[in-house]
Amino acid sequence: MEYIHQNFDVNFKYGVHFSSHLFDPANTCLSAFLESRADAAFQKKLLVILDGGVAAAHPGLPDQITRYLSAVRGFQPAPEIITISGGESVKNDLPLVFSLVDAIDKYGIDRHSYVIGIGGGSLLDLVGFVAAISHRGVKHIRIPTTVLSQNDSGVGVKNGVNYKGKKNFLGSFAPPSAVFNDSHFLTTLDSRDWRSGMVEAVKVALIRDTAFFEWIEEKAVALTSGDMPGMQYLIFRCAELHVAHIGGGGDPFESGSSRPLDFGHWSAHKLEQLTSFSLRHGEAVAIGIALDSVYSFLLGWLDEASMYRIISVLKNMQLPVWHPLLEKQDGRPSPVVAGLEEFREHLGGRLTISLLKAIGTGAETHHMDLDLLYAAADICKKLQ
Amino acid sequence: MEYIHQNFDVNFKYGVHFSSHLFDPANTCLSAFLESRADAAFQKKLLVILDGGVAAAHPGLPDQITRYLSAVRGFQPAPEIITISGGESVKNDLPLVFSLVDAIDKYGIDRHSYVIGIGGGSLLDLVGFVAAISHRGVKHIRIPTTVLSQNDSGVGVKNGVNYKGKKNFLGSFAPPSAVFNDSHFLTTLDSRDWRSGMVEAVKVALIRDTAFFEWIEEKAVALTSGDMPGMQYLIFRCAELHVAHIGGGGDPFESGSSRPLDFGHWSAHKLEQLTSFSLRHGEAVAIGIALDSVYSFLLGWLDEASMYRIISVLKNMQLPVWHPLLEKQDGRPSPVVAGLEEFREHLGGRLTISLLKAIGTGAETHHMDLDLLYAAADICKKLQ
Ligand SMILES: NC(=O)c1ccc[n+]([C@@H]2O[C@H](COP(=O)([O-])OP(=O)(O)OC[C@H]3O[C@@H](n4cnc5c(N)ncnc54)[C@H](O)[C@@H]3O)[C@@H](O)[C@H]2O)c1
Ligand SMILES: NC(=O)c1ccc[n+]([C@@H]2O[C@H](COP(=O)([O-])OP(=O)(O)OC[C@H]3O[C@@H](n4cnc5c(N)ncnc54)[C@H](O)[C@@H]3O)[C@@H](O)[C@H]2O)c1
Ligand SMILES: [Zn+2]
Ligand SMILES: [Zn+2]
């Protein structure tokens, strides 16, 4: 029997830039990046897709963007900036996916042009997916505008939209060309988004970096009440840990079942869905972290004092640590607990859940004891 | 300004296996591959999507597949084999994309399970796309059943569907887990598919391998009238050259504008679309190769004798070398020629067209002279 073997590597690289007032004419952060990618032989095109929540909070922004991009040498911005509402609902809207694909077609965005997404994690997940499937992948730049997207979702390699109520059922792995974090955008976030976005930092600190957890613990109250320099450090360090994990963890496109960065997420994804996304992603993850930390304690993996410290940090951030859907409903299983199998399926293969051995040290289990899980949920209820 | 740099490689590998009667219980080619990927900890799932043209030509095949896959250790086939009509029309059917996504959901195909596409290049392009966007990419195995898909499309890394009449507007780069070429399937191809599939071999020989072109030239008449051992060699060598180009050409996911394997394709894609896909892909490429070979001659790049040899090979394969849409229509530009800009856009960036310097030697141009192109079309018309 004859046989041909294929084997190749594809390199992916991108920078995560930190700046403020990106579209100020004097700020060359974005324009210098773009001009470094210009080609003397032809004009490249730019299409901006903007989060309606950001546009509403920053009047004049579309004009400012238009002026800024028009001055970039070698690039031709599309004649309109496309503004769509922000938030999770944009990920539940298949016709919107295709209307953005239509815009890529209409404005002649080719594989050398750039789609620029400006907004929260939801908008960026949608825009990344649209870019990934058009022309077998057009380049995209992310300008995340929430704490969560600046420290986690926007700096990673995944995109996705929900399908028939299933979180991120459609999506792909498609690294951006570059990411620009602009701290000025954070000044207009509402309190829920400001606070809940910090949870991803708590998460990555818990599985990876004791010192960072201690820093967060010390600053939790100040951060929660609006400490901007503190928030900038939190975002930088959290993004750095995420980027290092993706690039250095040996499995950037998640072909295995192990996903330490999904600590606290199995129940969070299910809670988001069950509450029709009335919980913010970060709020749901706060509950998920609380649950899996207490479960780690009950399992004998995590000491009691550490467990209490984790709950305290979350409560100091004024985040929830429990939800009624974690309980049995009239004697029937909790719908969150019932979602474990769905999570396994999304992950593929064996059930693999991240837990904690200590603050700063994640570990995995392939079995969840349901009685212990309900007991953990009960403790969370008491501690809330 | 702070900055984080991301940089990683992703490795892709897969084998292209050559066999015959793959689903014969005694043939362990596919089962051995699957069992090598089994995991003692859990069952992996299999979902087969079958080309209706293949099913019609091979009665009993679905049962045979079911029996074969049920015996593979560590895998659980879905309770049904999904049979869809074959041919280009499946790539023009967005609801079909989503009904296959629904099947992936319904049958719990996770990121460790496999979707197996069995059929022509059209079905494989569709199935590859569906697999690529579900759960951010589930694994897929290709079992190509046409000459074209066994020697070209099925062994590569691209997938795609058409969108609003635009060829492959939606798609991605997603290498398969494995490819199994079964020569027995070829025995039921209709003559147009048998003949037109050989064009990709002519193409790759012309840009890469003089000796292979000479072999094809010598065998063209015999191949056309059904020489199966000859066809098996043609497919093997053509697949080998494609695989080598993709893995060794330095740009497997086509981030640059250079696509030597698209020799003859700029006009072919447009012709397929303009004729509502009544031309087979290979027939359209035959016309495209003829046009660009004559153009290469008129440009002074290719000698006259070589140009005639190329036309003769195509004619010996009973393939078209001209189409009325290459002419001006009532004084207005030929719609194929008008499609050059669209091709540039699909490619991105500068216009880059593959031409010939000699038989076995491709070369690129960034400018097409329209008068010369019409003159080339005229010569093709006379030579048809
Ligand atoms: N791709 C990944 O790797 C990944 C990782 C984590 C989370 N996510 C996804 O990210 C999404 C959540 O993103 P998010 O938390 O950024 O929220 P979001 O994008 O849903 O935005 C929340 C709200 O804030 C508004 N908004 C955004 N920026 C603003 C600003 N600067 N000022 C005022 N209002 C603003 C939006 O319009 C929206 O109403 C979820 O869908 C989650 O699944 C993806
Ligand atoms: N992804 C890539 O890299 C790539 C490369 C080249 C071509 N393509 C695409 O491949 C498609 C063309 O594929 P194709 O030429 O294989 O044709 P096809 O898939 O359109 O099939 C042609 C016909 O043959 C039937 N058929 C398939 N196998 C058969 C068999 N063994 N016996 C009897 N009938 C059979 C089908 O049902 C269909 O009716 C085009 O869409 C083209 O764009 C993709
Ligand atoms: Zn998260
Ligand atoms: Zn082709």
Image (cartoon, coloured by chain):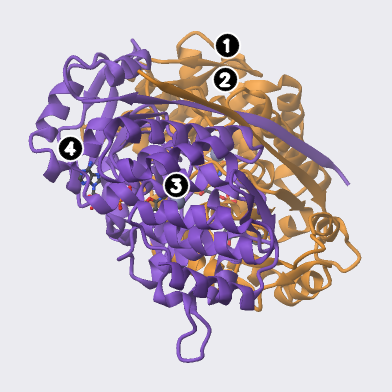
Chain colours: A purple, B orange
Please, what secondary structure does the residue beneath circle 3 have?
Answer: helix
Query: Mark 4 to mark 1: distance in Å?
Result: 51 Å
Please, what secondary structure does the residue beneath circle 2 have?
Answer: helix
- The residue that label 1 is drawn on is B303
Residue A200 - label: 3
From the viewer's perspective, is the residue at label 4 or at label 1 nearer?
4
Asked if ligand 1 lies within 8 A of label 4, the reply is no
- The residue that label 4 is drawn on is A81
Please, what secondary structure does the residue beneath circle 4 have?
Answer: loop
Query: Mark 4 to mark 3: distance in Å?
Result: 30 Å
Asked if ligand 3 lies within 8 A of label 3, the reply is yes
Please provide percent x and percent y for residue B185. 73, 59
Asked if ligand 4 lies within 8 A of label 1, the reply is no
Kindly check if marks 2 and 4 are in contact, taking CB atoms under 8 A apart as contact: no
Q: Quadrant of residue A67?
A: top left
Kindly check if marks 4 and 1 are in contact, taking CB atoms under 8 A apart as contact: no
Kindly check if marks 1 and 3 are in contact, taking CB atoms under 8 A apart as contact: no
* Label 1 environment density (alpha carbons within 10 Å; few <14, some 14–19, many ≥20): some
